Amino acid sequence: MVARFRISEWVGAMRWKAVAAATVSLAALTMQAPASADEASTEVSQVVVTAPRTTDLEQVVTVDKTGSPIKDQPRSIQVVPDVLIHEQGGVHLVDALRDVSGAVQGGQFAFGFFDRVIVRGLNVSYLNDGLPDGTSDLTGTVHSLTGVERVEVLKGPGSALYGDTEEGGTINLVHFKPSDVLGAGVSEQYGAFNTSTTDAYVTGPTGLAHVDYRVDAEYQTSDGFRGQASRNGEVHAAFSYRPENHDVELRLEYQHLEATPDATGIPFSPPKGTGLPIDVSVNDRYYTPYAFADQDIGRVFLSDAWTVSDFLTVNLRGAYSHRDVDLLRNAGGSVTANPSEPGDYELARRQLREQHDHIGDLNLQAEPTWRFSTGLLKHVLITGGQVRAIDGTTWRETADLPLISNIYAPAVTDPALSSLVFKCDAGHSCDDADLRARFFGLYAIDQIDVTQKLKLRLSVRQDWFDTDGVARALLPVNPGQEQPCSPPSANACPWVPGRPVKRNDAPASYDVGAVYFLTPQLSLFGGYSSDFYPIFNTEEPETVGQEPERGTQTEVGLRGQKGGWLTASTSLYQVSRDNVFTLLTEPNPNGKGNIDVAQNFSYQVQGWETDVNLRPTRSWNVLFNTAVQDGKITRYPQTPADLGHAPPSVPSFLANIFTTYDWALPGEAGTLQGSFGLRYRDHEYADAGLTRLIPGEPLLDLGLSWMTGRYTVSAGVQNLLDQRNFLYGDGTGGGALPGAGRTGWVRLAAKL
């Protein structure tokens, strides 16, 4: 406890000093190179430099669409390469969050079995090679890194580029393309909780003219922290066809996921389930042991970059994905006094939800890209159109579970699944509905080089969002499938078969900004962007008729790059998220079970972010990022007392550092690399009333790698000091989901 206190105090005292030092030194460092960097060129010339850069400002990213380098973008974009993620022992997308300032895992409704990422205090959307990946932020998937070359993060609203996106940003997973040179590789990573991750790939020419291939596969099994066992398998097959003036790619993907959801975590403190999580072992479990979340996902992706002339390239993209979801997870749970044992507290109102979803998602894009000049102005103009069609069905019922009589010594006595009675009524959420969405968009993006020093971005998009849901069966009035009545009344009205609940919106989104180069290495950038996100998901089908979420971002920043030894960026921003519709699971005041209570609120976040990638010598690499955030709720008609409160899942401070050092071994023995990392997330709240506190702790990591020729052997320890830590608030009515203590991993990789 003493060590933990001292480290936390040190981090708190250093937060502003670290941010200020990194920011103030940006311009000075960008203007001059250190002597040590020059001296290193002779002293350690034999070292194989392996430490990667996170975001090279000269790099062209696909998430931007225009093909312009990051340095010409009027907003924050970050890139995390696969090599860096492997050095840190990562195997999933959330493992890359430490390398992105202002990014954190969690948010309410994660339910302990799928990715939910918060950037700048707001939810994000996902892309798979530039096309939408997933139909909502609820009941999503665990994004693996199979065949992923890099992770691109566009911060803030992306509707002007992609239409129906969340306000926090867009994460794009960019996969390796097939190569015309034969190559193959295999890796095995083994870690805590009997976790095994096996990856393999092979690429090369097919023997047919202009046709190459690549196949990636992964298989992962784990007993899981706190018994959350999982098993995942996937295979990706890609084929490229590159005749003159065309670059055609076909990708076929299949993924099978088996997870054990923990939608309860560790309860908050009695008497009302508030304050801090209770002081019990992080290995104590409150979730149903036979809970499961299984998914099967298939995807077909086809694209063509058709070079019509030096002035015109037409990019055509299309994808269809189908996802089947079968899950059994906990819901609800209230900490109450045990009437038979004075002084003890129980976890009552526990429930189990059974749900089956089937979702098809078709995406089509056509983007003529024009390169031309008007006078002295150079343009890259994209004129595009997009069509998206989503069709899904969802079915859910809920069963009551026995209470846990003592939250300090939990004994889960849930009976066999076959003996449970699943219900559909006011206290037991249920649905049985067909859902449909049709999204259409027309857009123009103009990247303008006014001079070598001044770059402008002008983007506008017009979208048409049509969503509807219709009941497949007439269900009793329950929170899972009902709408506000028309004309309005005190009670909600159930969905009726044959009477679709519809909503149509036609929003316009904008993204404008400028970059001005003070020197060739240092620039100012700033911009404004807006966002619209239609509420459409199978977890809450009753949200179909709600007004879309809206968001805006205003950002101004400074960034620079000097040779290969320094990249730095810092920015101030204000983001907003309006019309947030959510459901809180609360005890049924009129009987057994729980009810879902609709909430609608708005909030904004102001922040300051800094990212630095420094290489003092050829063998020493330092990555550092930090974010200071100040969020507040600006509208909450259901509970006006929450106005001005910090929004849930928005920590006030985030900081990460990761540094590596390479030593050249004698002769042909290769290179030894040591690494050190520190991750810190300040406390955050799990509710708008600021009654449920999720503490933050600094987590230290160490690693060691040996690289020789085609082989790499790596090992690491995460959370070296075995700090008790929590990831996020779990579910609605749940507790806090704990993170693992001290764990270790080892990875063997070979390029064949």
Image (tube, helix red, strand yellow):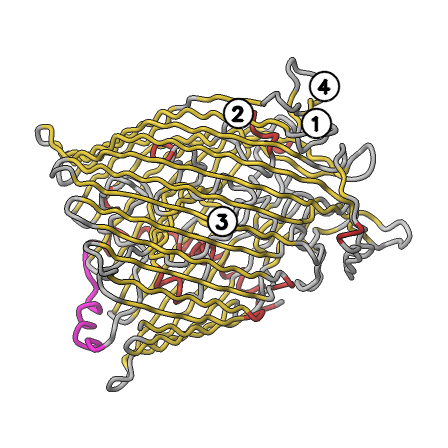
Question: What type is the residue that disc 3 sits on?
Answer: Ile
Location of mark 1 (residue): 474
Q: Residue at x 45, y 49 (%)?
A: 103
Amino acid type for the residue under numbered disc 2? Glu
Q: Residue at image x 72%, y 19%? A: 490
Mark 4 / mark 3, whichever is N-terminal? 3
| Mark 3, residue position | 297
* Above/below status of 115 relative to 4: above
371 left or right, relative to 13: left
Image location of residue 423, percent across then percent down: 76, 39
Of residue 512 and residue 142, the one placed in the foreground of this image is: 142
Please name the residue that numbered disc 2 is placed on.
Answer: 547
Q: Is residue 274 left or right of residue 701?
A: right
What's the magenta region?
A: 31-46
Q: Is residue 371 above or below residue 752?
A: above
Mark 4 or mark 3: which is in front? 3
Q: What's the residue type where badge 4 is placed?
A: Ala
How far separated are the C-alphas under marks 1 and 3? 30 Å
Cα separation, mark 4 vs mark 3, equals: 41 Å
Residue drawn at point x = 22 percent, y = 57 percent: 208
Between 514 and 356, the residue placed more toward the observer is 356
Task: Quickly name the residue at label 4.
Answer: 490
Answer with the quarter of the image where residue 637 lies. top right
Residue 35 lies in the magenta-colored region: yes
Question: What kind of element bears circle 4?
Answer: loop
Element type where label 3 sits in the image = strand
Query: Is residue 655 at all visible to an observer of this figure?
Result: no
Among numbered discs 3 and 2, the one appearing first in the sequence: 3
In front: label 3 or label 2: 3
